[in-house]
Image (cartoon, rainbow, N blue to C red):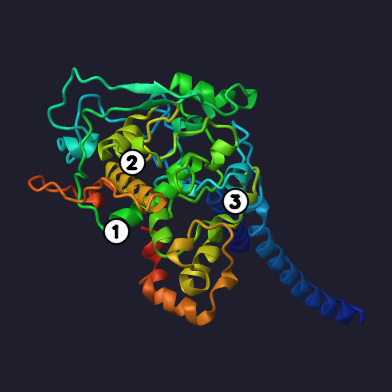
Amino acid sequence: MAQFFNKSANNIARISMVAAAVLAGVGGFAFTQFSRSSYLTGRYVEKQQPVQFSHKHHVGDDGIDCRYCHQTVETTATAGMPATQTCMNCHSQLWADSPYLEPVRASFRDNKPIEWERVHDLPEYTYFNHSIHVAKGVGCSTCHGQIDNMPAVFQENTLQMEWCIACHRAPEKFIRPKKEIFNMAWQDGDLDEKERKQLKSDLKIRSKEMMTSCSTCHR
Amino acid sequence: MLKNKRNYLYGLLLIAYCLLTVGCGLRFDMQDQPRYKVYKKSEWFKDGLSTRDQVAGTVARGHLHDNKAFYTGKIDNPDLNAVVTSTVTSTGNTLVTSFPNDIDEFPIPVTKELVDRGQDRYNIHCIVCHGPVGNGDGMVVRRGFPKPPTYHDDRLRNAPVGHFFDVMTNGWGRMSSYSYQIQPADRWAIVAYIRALQVSQNPDESLKMSTKPESNTPAPKPAETTNANTNGGHR
């Protein structure tokens, strides 16, 4: 019987084994990168809204506190979207004729809420509550980024589980004193490691085991 | 031979089944479940709101608001014929100069915690127009909103506390009602802080400032009212 494979088949076999390993590695890496990409997570994608509302102007330039509009952030799960009345507190007088604000005036006239586009859309199998995070030293900008510098708001973080759990495993790396929660200029470097440990115990943040328990977020 | 062929067929079926399940796994039913979360649009209600208003004429448990002084800042038996006098300034502000039906004493005990809470809330809701110390030079005023009157004149130093509460609750002039933005207990806290600001800007004058709590009506706990949310009890 003649040789079925000639001698070069040895090299082809070796190369194809290495190539398969490399391909699997590259493929695996590509998968991890793709699943974290903004194409899938929506990160960094600016949403166009029915009104060209600029957080950069209202927060950054005017210095209005987050809670002037997001009133329920300290008491309920949702931070709270302002009623159109809140816009009209100022815009009954300022830019009252501006065509850009016509959707706001129309909403006020017709008593119909403005239909804002949701920017941060958590999957509905996760339980998330703003009030507990705010009460335990997680600042607005820790998750939402420099809102005071965003003309159109985008999602600053992936909102993927690995991102949530990174903080739930080691909250002391991300927390800040309670009076700085709404401070957009706060920097993580403003506290050293010892102060962070102290702050974690002052805020009575629960153990890593409790914080990373499945039912903490999936209930 | 026949057995091999059958195995081959089973193999193909298995692969097809795997592809099918993977395909179905890419659905998003769990991400977007057919239930209402806050601000989710409703297909059921005509106005598209999943967050429903309370039915007209009903009172939620604990929200009867029968403590008139606490919820309105008005005296129990107001004189309906009392004339509220006002003047119009050169800048177009209409100023009240008599306060016949406003209560003159805080309906809750004035504590340091209350004043601190008031400072906190003042710096959120009031500072935008009234400014850090209450002389009416807030950022929004600098952007062109008509300047509100200062707190630091005899008219408002002598105004009863009920007047400030009433203005926050019902609005006055170009100021809208803040009753849905600030809960009643927080409104009283802000009144206490405004009094503190008035002392701070006029330290030498004795100030008409009563800290006596009402003796016979128990003060509602601030926590009860500040937690009253507008989101239908969503968790």
On the image, numbered disc 3 is attached to which residue?
A147
Which of labels 1 and 2 is toward the front? Answer: 2
Q: Which disc, if any, is residue A208?
A: none
At x 49%, y 82%, the residue is A194
Q: Amino acid at mark 2?
A: Arg
Relative to B117, does residue B127 appear above or below in the rendering?
Answer: above
Instruction: Give, as a three-letter code, the residue at label 1.
Output: Glu
Are the residues flagged by discs 1 and 3 in contact, CB closer than 8 Å?
no
Which residue is labeled 1 in the image?
B113
Callout 3, which amino acid? Ile
Q: Is residue B63 visible?
A: no
- Judging from the image, mark 2 belongs to the subunit labelled B
**Could you confirm whether marks 3 and 2 are on the same chain?**
no
Pick the residue in front: A139 or A37. Answer: A139
Say which of A133 and A14 sits in front: A133
- Image coords of residue A218 (percent x, y): 40, 59
Badge 2: how crowded within 10 Å, few (<14), some, or many (20+)?
some
**Label 3 CA crowd tier, 10 Å (few <14, some 14–19, many 20+):** many
- Spatial separation of the CA atoms under disc 3 and disc 2: 39 Å
* Direction from residue A118 to residue A126 in the image, left or right: left
> Residue at position x 44%, y 44% from top?
B134
Q: Which residue is mark 2?
A: B157
Instruction: Give the x, y percent position of residue B158.
Output: 29, 39
The Cα atoms of the two marked residues, 1 and 2, are separated by: 22 Å
Q: Secondary structure at mark 1?
A: helix
Q: Nearer the viewer, residue A36 or B101?
A: B101
Whether residue A158 can be seen here:
yes
> Looking at the picture, how far across and down is residue B33, in whole percent?
43, 44
Q: Residues within 10 Å of mark 1 (few under 14, many from 20)?
A: few
Q: Secondary structure at mark 2?
A: helix
Disc 1: host chain: B
Residue B85 image-quadrant placement? top left
